Amino acid sequence: MRIFASALLGALALASMDTAIAESRLQPSTPKPPKPELQLKAPASLPDLVVIKAVRGPDYSNGQGRIFLQVKNVGTAAVGKSQGLATHDNNVGCGTYFMVPALAPGAISSHTIRYCEDVAKGTRIRVIADQTKKYAESKENNNRLFFNW
């Protein structure tokens, strides 16, 4: 009886395996759906103030120098008015603040500012746009430009 039951169970197992193989052969394989693409978020629209030009201009009659400079919003959003700063690179000596007006994307503002009296030739000057970091920008490390007096 045990042999008969074992033989019967083995025959049933083989029959069900044959049926499964036959079913898989009869049905075409269904393609797997493609993996969902990586969804990249569009970058946030932010302004980006950059000092694109800063040079020494002629001195005033009282010995104060001038700095001609330009600030550009290279970002993708408008920015409100902000404060800039021109100062000695080592923060020793004088500094001059200037106001940068509100700028649309791609807009440039030009400034002529008075600078310190009797600045030694070769002094390294740093000009910073949005010196107070009033606005979040797409790049915070490009707000400065250096030049030698």
Image (spheres, rainbow, N blue to C red):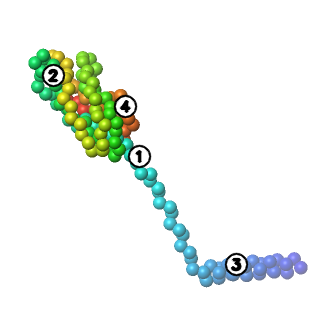
Query: Of callouts 3 and 2, which one flags the residue occurring earlier in the amino acid sequence?
Result: 3
What percent of the width, then of the height, locates residue 120?
15, 18
Q: Which residue is drawn at 35% across and 28% down?
A: 132
Seen in the picture, residue 121 relative to 20 is either above or below; the reply is above
Does residue 54 appear to the left or right of 128 in the view shown?
Answer: left
Frontmost of labels 1 and 3 is: 1
Circle 2 residue: 65
Does residue 137 appear to the left or right of 38 in the view shown?
Answer: left
Q: Which residue is drawn at 24% across and 18% down?
A: 94
CA distance separating discs 1 and 2? 40 Å
Quadrant position of the N terminus in the picture: bottom right
Tell me the kind of residue under disc 2: Gly
Does residue 57 appear to the left or right of 1 in the view shown?
Answer: left
CA distance separating discs 4 and 1? 18 Å
Q: Residue 22 carries which label?
A: none
Circle 3 residue: 17
Q: Is 143 or 27 nearer to us in this picture?
A: 143
CA distance separating discs 1 and 3? 57 Å
Q: Do the residues labelled 2 and 4 touch (CB within 8 Å)?
A: no
Tell me the kind of residue under disc 4: Lys
What percent of the width, then of the height, locates residue 6?
82, 77
CA distance separating discs 4 and 3? 72 Å
Q: Which residue appears farthest toward the right when viewing the image?
A: 1
Frontmost of labels 3 and 2 is: 2
Seen in the picture, residue 73 relative to 56 is either above or below; the reply is below
| Among the 4 quarters of the image, the one containing residue 113 | top left
Query: Of callouts 2 and 4, which one flags the residue occurring earlier in the amino acid sequence?
Result: 2
Circle 4 residue: 133
Tell me the kind of residue under disc 1: Ala
Circle 1 residue: 44
Q: Is 28 or 101 nearer to us in this picture?
A: 101
What percent of the width, then of the height, locates residue 75?
32, 43
